[in-house]
Image (cartoon, rainbow, N blue to C red):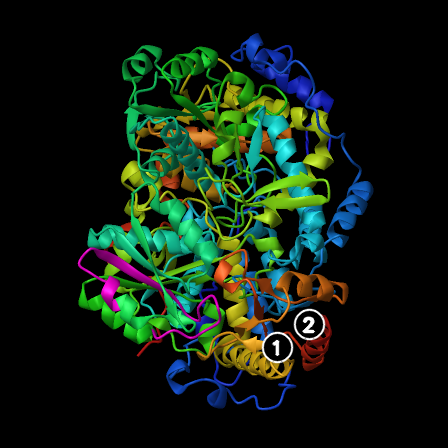
Amino acid sequence: MRYISNTAAQQKEMLGVIGASSIEDLLVRIPTKARLSRPLNLPGAMAETDLVRHLQRLADRNAGADDHACFLGAGSYDHAIPSPINHLISRGEFFTAYTPYQPEASQGTLRSIFEYQTMMAELTGMDVANASIYDGASSLAEAALMAHSVTGRDTILVSRGVNPLYRQVVETYAEGPELKLKSLPLGDGVTDGDALRKATSKHTAAVVIQYPNFFGCLEDVRGAAQVAHETGALLIVVADPINLGLLTPPGASGADIVVGEGQGLGVPMSFGGPNLGVFAAKQELVRRMPGRLVGATVDVDNQRGFVLTLQTREQHIRREKATSNICTNVALCALMATIYVAILGKRGLRKVGELSTAKAHYAVRELTKIPGVRLRFAAPFFKEFTLQLPKAPERVIKRLLKDRMLAGVPLKGFDRAYKDCLLVAVTEKRTREEIDAYAAALAAAVA
Amino acid sequence: MPVTRAAYDKLVFELSSPGRFAYSLPESDVPDSDPAALLPAEHVRATAAELPEVSEVDVIRHYSRLSQMNYGVDTHFYPLGSCTMKYNPKINEDMARLGGFARLHPLAPEAGSQGALQLMWELARDLAEISGMDEVSLQPAAGAQGELAGVLMIRAYHLARGERRHKVLIPDSAHGTNPASTTLAGFSAVELKSEANGDVDLADLERHLDEDVAAFMITQPNTLGLFESKIHQITEMCHAKGVQVYMDGANFNAILGITRPGDLGFDVCHFNLHKTFTTPHGGGGPGSGPVGIKAHLAPFLPTPVVTRRDEGFGLDWSRPQSIGKLQAFWGNFGMLVRAYTYIRTMGPDGLRSVSENAVLNANYMLKRLEGDYDRSAPGPCMHECVLSARRQKKLGVTAMDIAKRLLDLGFYAPSTYFPLIVEEALMIEPTETESKETLDQFCDAMIQIAREAESDPHVIHQAPLTTPVRRLDQTLAARQPVLRWRQPQ
């Protein structure tokens, strides 16, 4: 049998040592009534060649970014992935290890996480980052819970500029501790400052904004921090670290916790998962943080080494009193991001931001030349923007799919108020030729 | 083989040299591309992030060297109990990397994601068949999130029936995630004392079952590696009081094709695809923790649910009683492709054979080691066995010392000090993919250590000597946390 190493002769020999006549003898604790008396009703085993053919056929039925110009964003982005990443993460010593419970035999993973924590802290402008959470949305949910436990307050104000899919995850996590979620309205694409001031009170645990926000617009982080801090609330900023090579880090604008989706940093889109939940905070909050943390220390010979630390926050020690239930996180995605940031480095990451900005702004100029197509919000944007179309976005998307273009994310499903809107993302990977072809196809589709 | 002690002690930041780079980016091909003109000044970073400046060779060599400081399943026997560190088939990796999967955007139109949705729909059905549950959600990102989803569905179920129950019963032998997930879902976790072999104490359970109990959460087989024989009685007792029964599926590798949680009376169970279904552990994830439920809990499944319609596969969002979303998108799809590939590779007979051989291997090790280490329970075990080093502890050698010595002898260590109800626990899970030869080498090493504990404990206390670093000062790390690198001043 494939992947089972023992031969029939060895199995017999082992049973002999155990003193059992068959494997059945070893299952005596399972009552007959509990046994499955038939084979599992699953398709039969497939040979590798047949299986590859079958899966290739399934994969070919998907409109992937290899053969479609991808203008989709909303939390997952088609950024270029440098070749070394896949080679390095595929090394079995990284790939097939587990959580570094024995640090002496896990220094590779521990060192890479320590590097990752440093990079994320640098990019977000925060003091510390953890070893990762599942994805940006669950990171935000954990941040909301943390703000609740730090402040002892139970209301979280969430801007409508925060990705609606993230807001749904926060709602799920808020159910148990019965947090009150209140949404903050937008004024022309960004969080309404007056509404924010009015909503903030001594019951507010945290204010949550996204930078750039779901619609692509650049929020006033500094202003939000000021309002939040006046009442003793924390400011949580959702930000994509790939953008922070160029954009002002939320930490520099007064954020207390920065979370976000790190998928853009070398992690394949993979139909939305696995992703990379980034979680960074100010130093004074470190003992309330969820998730693993790697720290530097020394060994008995006084040589530098790294360990999982501050573990008394975690479920395997603190059980029902843990700061979070998280155990397995996304270490391998964090490794992809670490290698990505090492490759792009100080200048490369900034350049990715510059290219994305330039191409997105070029796209807006070209697309808004089409009669009836306009930018929905006047606020400054970065690499993503919201278009208002004269025809139903769903029809446009369908039409452009035929031309092997993924036109954007229709906003109708998220908010009826934006039923005529399309969210478009332009990464550094898109070429002028693709943008021009997109503009021509869109012009034809709305004509 | 033992790793030779590396002289390498660099972090990528320490390789940095101003002006060096490894990236390849195109020049801008669009006009007017000066970011200073496109973005308001306050939004542009004032100072560059302190990131490394290294060459591609630096990157390759650095991370290759770091990888050599790790033990993994590909290089070492990794008997980490409760984690099912089995071989991760390479074909799974090839399939997850197919362009139509790896480079598919989650919000691609349904017409352009039929292959991915079909795979998810089929995998959910397969897991339902394997577990005997009625429906499966693939959305949870890991086991702990599967637990949260399961417990939240139980909460929603009771509330929908107008019942507000506050407690969840959990045995003292449970994984730490169980009480943590329960608290997160708004319940108070009540710990039940297990019998010495990890079995549920029925009289104690009976005393605790009342109208305020929402659920009973147990691991089957339990964390001592034993099948809970009275399971039907337990589920019936619970159901009689309206209590839902949750199965922590961490130990699913013991029961594939042999018995099914759904048939045992469980209402909810989660799967760890990174354990039983061969998706790699990646140094601590990503995992994938689908959750299976009986039909009465179906209205509460996380949204969206993958469905099959006349016109093809799709995502169903119209679930008014749903507990909502757990992560931004649909699940850890890359892991789902790997698990699907594995299930299709093995087929029904292969999967049963997996569990049979996992059980055989564990019992063989138990037999070989029971003379030198104390067993935690009599009789055969399932897929893992828990030994106690209490005999060695009397000689001054702890479970942790034994773990460190194993590293020198070329093996990763078993789980130590878990379950909490076994003194000096060593939890050993060989999995079915290991051969008798490997098991013998490991048992020989364990027996050698037991002898050393009697004759030469010094060699154990010094261990490990062959790893890149020796025993590390955990207290220092926690007392003065250094959680990031900083440029030396």
Q: Position of residue A376 (x, y in %)?
A: 51, 74
Q: Residue A9 sits in which quadrant?
A: top right
Visible residue check, residue B171? no
Q: Is residue B87 above or below residue A128?
A: above
**Chain ID for label 2?**
A
Q: At x 65% / y 86%, what residue is drawn?
A: B29
- Was residue A321 drawn as part of the magenta stretch in this picture? no
Q: Residue A197 sits in which quadrant?
A: bottom left
Q: Is residue B408 above or below residue A289?
A: above
Q: At x 75% / y 48%, what residue is drawn?
A: A58
**Chain ID for label 1?**
A
Identify the residue under disc 2: A446
Find residue B288 and name its label: none
Q: Amino acid at mark 2?
A: Val
Callout 2 environment at 10 Å: few (<14), some (14 to 19), or many (20+)? some
Q: Amino acid at mark 1?
A: Gly
- Was residue A205 drawn as part of the magenta stretch in this picture? yes
Please tell me if label 1 and label 2 are on a single chain. yes
Quadrant showing the C terminus of chain B? bottom left
Q: Looking at the image, do the residues carrying marks 1 and 2 touch, with CB atoms under 8 Å apart?
A: yes
In the picture, measured across the screen, residue A262 lies left or right of residue B389, that is right
Q: Position of residue B289 (x, y in %)?
A: 51, 40
Q: At x 51% / y 52%, what residue is drawn?
A: B70
Identify the residue under disc 1: A372
Q: Position of residue B253 (x, y in %)?
A: 57, 29
Q: Position of residue B77 (x, y in %)?
A: 56, 39
Q: Magenta stretch: give its range.
A: A197-220
In the picture, measured across the screen, residue A338 lies left or right of residue B243, that is right
